[in-house]
Image (tube, helix red, strand yellow):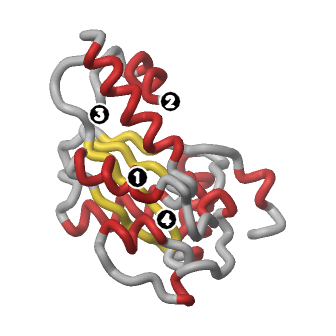
């Protein structure tokens, strides 16, 4: 994904990347690819802030990043975003390392925010995104309102699937 991002954006990376983080391999792979491309001199300049997005019911990366303990309620309940339902990701330490290196953060959103986002993206943009991808819009709104993302920054949000396989969850 990191190589695809760089190529699609003409080798100019965005300022911020929001990624729906379940197991974390995508987030880590993107970061690794950026380093590889910089070493090959395909990229110059700074790397984007990486932001992991999870649900409020299953948020091990958010908890670890912000150093708040995981409670039973916060770790393992149902979520409409099946791909984010990873209560014990094997790559947790590496994900947090990437977030810290990139000066990024981790944020959690509710299932209701995800459902509302699916509807908004469908209605306003004609996009039928998976719940994981839909989690990024409310996360973006939260981060903009807190000033963690500036209005003039270039933001990339990665959708990882289509809503069709989730209809029974919704």
SS label for mark 4: strand
Real-space CA distance between mark 4 and mark 1, rounded to the nearest whole angstrom = 12 Å
What's the residue at 23%, 46% (across, down)? 101
Left or right of 123 in this view: 145: left
- Tell me where residue 136 appears, x and y as whole percent: 46, 56
Residue 16 is situated, as x and y percent measured from the top left of the image, at: 29, 43
User: Which marked residue is nearer to the observer: mark 4 or mark 1?
Assistant: 1
Check disc 4: other Cα within 10 Å, few if <14, some if 14-19, many if 20+.
many
Which of label 3 and label 2 is nearer to you?
Answer: 2
Left or right of 99 on screen, residue 86 = right
Mark sitting earlier along the chain (1/3): 3
Q: Earlier in the sequence, mark 4 or mark 1?
A: 4
Where residue 78 sits in the image (x, y, percent)? 68, 78
Residue at image position (72%, 53%) is 163
Quarter holding residue 141:
bottom left
Numbered disc in front, either 3 or 4? 4
For disc 4, the marked residue is 54
Measured as percent of width and height from the top left, residue 7 is found at 42, 16
Specify few, some or many for label 3: CA neighbours under 10 Å numbering under 14, 14-19, or 20 or more. Answer: some
Give the residue drawn at x 61%, y 64%. Answer: 86
The span from disc 3 to disc 4 (Cα, nearest Å) is 21 Å
In the picture of the structure, the residue carrying the numbered disc 2 is 1
Q: Quadrant of the C terminus?
A: bottom right
Camera-nearest label, 1 or 2: 1
Q: Is residue 65 left or right of residue 3?
A: left
Location of mark 1 (residue):
95
**164 w.r.t. 47: above or below:** below
Mark 3 = which residue?
A: 14
Real-space Cα separation, disc 1 to disc 2, in angstroms: 16 Å
Q: Residue at x 31, y 26 (%)?
A: 35
């Amino acid at each position: 994904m990191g190589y695809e991002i760089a190529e699609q954006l003409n080798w100019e990376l965005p300022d911020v990347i929001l990624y729906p983080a379940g197991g974390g391999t995508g987030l880590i792979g993107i970061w690794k690819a950026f380093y590889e491309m910089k070493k090959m001199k395909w990229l110059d300049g700074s790397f984007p802030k990486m932001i992991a997005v999870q649900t409020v019911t299953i948020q091990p990366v958010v908890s670890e990043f912000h150093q708040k303990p995981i409670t039973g309620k916060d770790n393992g309940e149902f979520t409409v975003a099946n791909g984010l339902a990873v209560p014990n990701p094997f790559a947790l330490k590496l994900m947090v390392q990437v977030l810290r290196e990139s000066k990024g953060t981790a944020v959690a959103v509710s299932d209701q925010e995800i459902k509302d986002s699916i509807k908004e993206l469908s209605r306003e943009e004609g996009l039928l995104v998976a719940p994981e991808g839909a989690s990024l819009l409310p996360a973006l709104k939260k981060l903009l309102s807190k000033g963690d993302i500036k209005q003039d920054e270039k933001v990339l949000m990665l959708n990882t699937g289509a809503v069709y396989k989730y209809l029974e969850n919704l």
